[in-house]
Image (cartoon, helix red, strand yellow):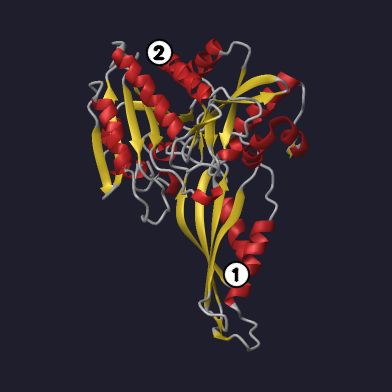
Amino acid sequence: MDTSNYGDNSGPGERKAAEYVAGLLADVQIEPQVFESEPGRTSVVARIPGEASDRPALLVHGHLDVVPAQKQDWQVDPFSGEVVDDCLWGRGAVDMKDMDAIILATIRQMRHEGRRPPRDIVLAFMADEEAGGVKGSSWLVDNHPGLFEGVDEAVSEVGGFSVELQGRRTYLLQSAEKGIAWVRLVATGRAGHGSQVNGDNAVTHLAQAVARIGAHRWPTVIPATVQAFFEGVHEQTGVQLLTGQEVDVEKLREMFGSTARWLEATVQNTANPTVLEAGYKHNVIPGQASALVDCRFLPGQRDELMRTLTELAGEHVKVEVLHSDVALEAGFEGGLVQAMRQSLLELDPGAAVLPYCLSGGTDNKAFSRLGIRGYGFAPLKLPADLDFAGMFHSVDERVPLESLRFGVRAFDRFLQLV
């Protein structure tokens, strides 16, 4: 199902996928509620009673949208769902229809077997996460907060997957995530004929600002979660990746492969220019030029990021914030964390489990406004040679079938322990 989210409401929306999810829930006597923030931008929410409904409920959530995919770049049609080499290929195979499928398979199996979770479970499958959740999680929180009454904790995507760490399988549980600041740079200057001398060219102002921002070396900052991660690596391997405020990036890349791309980004703020817009004719100097920059900030670092960004942009360039959301840090202790750890280690006894900070963001941001503490737990036991981290938002996205089967077993065990 093509649920591509282009960020401008031009995509197909999530309606078809939401109706499919609602049907799978209704098939096992779970009553789904379907919500549309706008036509076609559809989310599904349901509540499953637990054995002890007086306990705080657990939110289990996923998103139904995916980033776009260009068919010509892929080895298979990105929306064919083909199985090749014992892997399921397609856009969303790792972000995050794999997790949606794991949730649905686990819950349906529990219902078929007549089992109830220890506490109430709220299920949410949402629209628009890939554009910040404005038409999905944020809309639900703003307009239907009662759906999440009594919920104190949540689990969702991008955690619980395995990497090889010096020959030992290690699962990374996401207990923090960076904040988002999606900004537009707007440069102004003197419009004119392309043949004239022009020292006030908006395109030049913009290009200089983009170059400064793109080349800026952000200082190292070590949040508590990242500190715990480095300490865990040292305890497990004897390798010291962090000395004071200095990270040994080469060793990090050597130990973690493509996953290091995420880990490197958790010790600094980032600002990556992604889109340029200027001009309308070869011989016309435009009076305005703009660029989009994807900024991510560590907990407590938003003001510092915006101050530095404004300084780098310069006097001719205005910084407009199009979308901003919080950084989160949930901690790595308590019953929910223990349940995640135990469910993994029971199925993979020789493995290790470490916390980490996600360099991107999830719908946990919206739910934090309701006081819900969120984690990433989409359990996958992965082959050591699979470039899993490199497939997020990339071509030839795929997930091994055996990893999905492991995920269902681990998630089922997790829901028994919560």
The residue type indicated by label 1 comes to Leu
Q: Earlier in the sequence, mark 1 or mark 2?
A: 1
Q: Quadrant of residue 113?
A: top left
Can residue 52 be seen here? The reply is no
Residue at disc 1, secondary structure: helix
Spot occupied by residue 190 in the image (x, y as percentages of width and height): 56, 83
Can residue 317 be seen here? The reply is yes
* Residue lying at 28% horizontally and 11% vertically, measured from the top left: 114
User: What is the quadrant of the N terminus in the image?
Assistant: top left
Q: Is residue 180 above or below residue 322?
A: above
| Mark 2 neighbour class, 10 Å CA radius: few under 14, some 14 to 19, many 20 or more | some
Spot occupied by residue 325 in the image (x, y as percentages of width and height): 46, 46
Q: Between 167 and 252, which is closer to the camera in this rendering?
A: 167
Spot occupied by residue 231 in the image (x, y as percentages of width and height): 69, 25
User: What is the quadrant of the C terminus in the image?
Assistant: top left
Q: Viewed as shown, does residue 144 lie left or right of 127?
A: left
The residue type indicated by label 2 comes to Gln
Q: Quadrant of residue 349?
A: top right
Q: Which mark is residue 206?
A: 1
Q: Viewed as shown, does residue 215 lie left or right of 302?
A: right
| Mark 1 neighbour class, 10 Å CA radius: few under 14, some 14 to 19, many 20 or more | many
Labels 1 and 2 touching (C-beta < 8 A): no
Q: Which mark is residue 154?
A: none
For label 2, the residue is 416
Spot occupied by residue 124 in the image (x, y as percentages of width and height): 34, 32
* Residue lying at 54% horizontally and 53% vertically, measured from the top left: 294
Q: Quadrant of residue 351?
A: top right
Q: Is residue 130 above or below residue 189?
A: above
